[in-house]
Amino acid sequence: MADNMGCTTSSTTAVESPNVMTRNAEAADIVNEIKTHLRNLPHVHARTSPYQNQNGAPERIKLEDSQLCWKNSLEGYNPTDYHASVLLREPKFPWADVLDPKGIVFNALDQSCRHDRSSHEGVYLVNEANRPMNPRGRCGLSGRGLLGRYGPNHAADPVVTKWKRGTDGKKELNQDGDPILEFVAIQRKDTGDWAIPGGMVDPGENVSVTLKREFGEETMASMELSPEDQEILDKKLTEVFKEGIEIYSGYVDDIRNTDNAWMETVCVNFHDEEGTSFQKFKLAAGDDAGGVAWLPFTKDIQLYSTHAIFIETIYKMRLCLHGKN
Ligand code: RP5
C-alpha cells in the first residue's frame, strides 16, 4: 500500500505493476478527499436541539451556517453553560476534567492525566477564561455537555469490512453490478442509531490498542469472557487487525459537541478481501450496544454522526483497489 495513505507496511509484493500503482494513487485520492470534505463541512449534528435530542435537556441557540465562525462576532451570543450532572459528581471520574479549566494546558499532551489535549486539526483557540474553542465554531451551547474533557475527546473507529458472498463463495452484486460491501455495526443504546463500533481512547492508550479493544468489547462482548477466553480473542484480533488503512483523523460532528468540548476520531479500515478470516467472528453485542450485525453499505444508509461518510469512502476505496472481480 502507498505510504501517503497511512497504511501499515504490507508484507506482500516488493514490486507493484503500473496498474496496481495507479489504483493505489486513485485510492489515496479518495481518502484525501474525505478529509478536505469534512474540514469544509459546517457541523450539523453539533447544533441539534435540545442537546442530544433528549427531552428536558438544554436548548441550543439556533445558528445559521454563517454564524458559526469565532472570528465573526455574534452580538448577544450567550449560550447556556451545560455540564451533565455525571461530570459534577464527587469524587471525580478519572475520565473527566474539573469544572474550572483554569489550570489546564491545552494543545499539548497533559502529563497529569495522560490525556492528549492536542487536536488532529492543528492548534485550536483558547479563550480568556482558558476554555478551548470548538474548531468548527459555535454550537449554541457552552460547557462540556456530556463529554468528560474540555477540548478534544479522542475516540477510535475500527471499520471491519468484507464483500458480501453467496453460499457458493462468489461476491454478490448490487443493481449497478458492483460488489456489496458489508461492515460490522452496532446499535447505540443512547440514540438508537447504527454506528461503527468505536469508543474513547483510554488515558495513555495507543490508538491501535483502542481500535482492537473497542471492537472486542462492543461486537464480541469481550468483557463478559473469562480471562483465558479474553486472551484467545485478543490473539485473534491482533492477527486480523495487523494491517489497516487510516481513512480519517480529525473532528467528528457528534451531537454531544459543545463550544468547549468536542469529539475527534481516528478511523481505520480492516478489510477481509478473500472473505476467509472475519467470517469466523462470532458477533455478540457488548454492554454499550443494543445490537450488532454485518450491515451492507447502501448509498442511503443512515448512521450515527459522520459514520456513513466514512463507510462510503471505504466502499469507493475498496472498489478502486480491488476492481469488480
Ligand atoms: C463518535 O463517538 C466517534 O466517531 C466514535 O464512534 C464514538 C465514541 O463515543 P462512544 O461510543 O464511546 O460514546 O463521535
Image: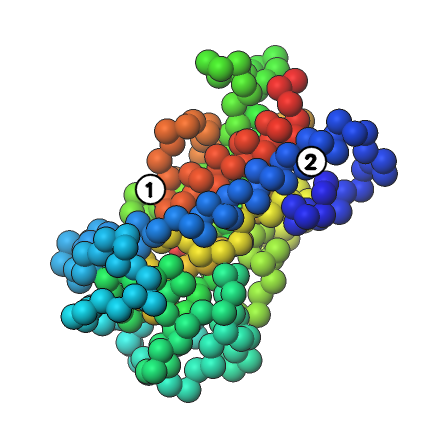
Q: Does the CB distance between marks 1 and 2 fall below 8 Å?
A: no
Can you say which quadrant of the picture contains the C terminus? top right
Q: Position of 18 compared to 220: left or right?
A: right
Vertical placement of residue 160 versus 182, above or below: below
How crowded pointer 2 is (Cα within 10 Å; few <14, some 14-19, many 20+) is rated as many
Residue 20 figure quarter: top right
Q: Secondary structure at mark 1?
A: loop
Residue 58 figure quarter: bottom left
Q: Secondary structure at mark 2?
A: helix
Q: Amino acid at mark 1?
A: Asp
- Rendered location of residue 135, percent (x, y): 40, 63
Q: Residue at x 28, y 76 (%)?
A: 88
- Label 1 residue near ligand 1, CB within 8 Å: no
Outermost residue on the bottom side: it is 103
Say which of 78 and 243 sits in front: 78
Which residue does the numbered mark 1 point to in the structure image? 193
Q: Residue at x 63, y 51 (%)?
A: 234
Of the two numbered discs 1 and 2 in the rendering, the one whose residue sits closer to the viewer: 2
| Whether residue 196 is visible | no
In the picture, the disc for residue 17 is none
Q: Position of 210 compared to 1: left or right?
A: left
Outermost residue on the front side: it is 72
- Rendered location of residue 212, percent (x, y): 58, 51
Q: Residue at x 44, y 64 (%)?
A: 153
Outermost residue on the right side: it is 14
Vertical placement of residue 36 versus 271, above or below: below
Q: Position of 16 compared to 282: left or right?
A: right
Q: Earlier in the sequence, mark 1 or mark 2?
A: 2
| Whether residue 251 is visible | yes
Which residue does the numbered mark 2 point to in the structure image? 24
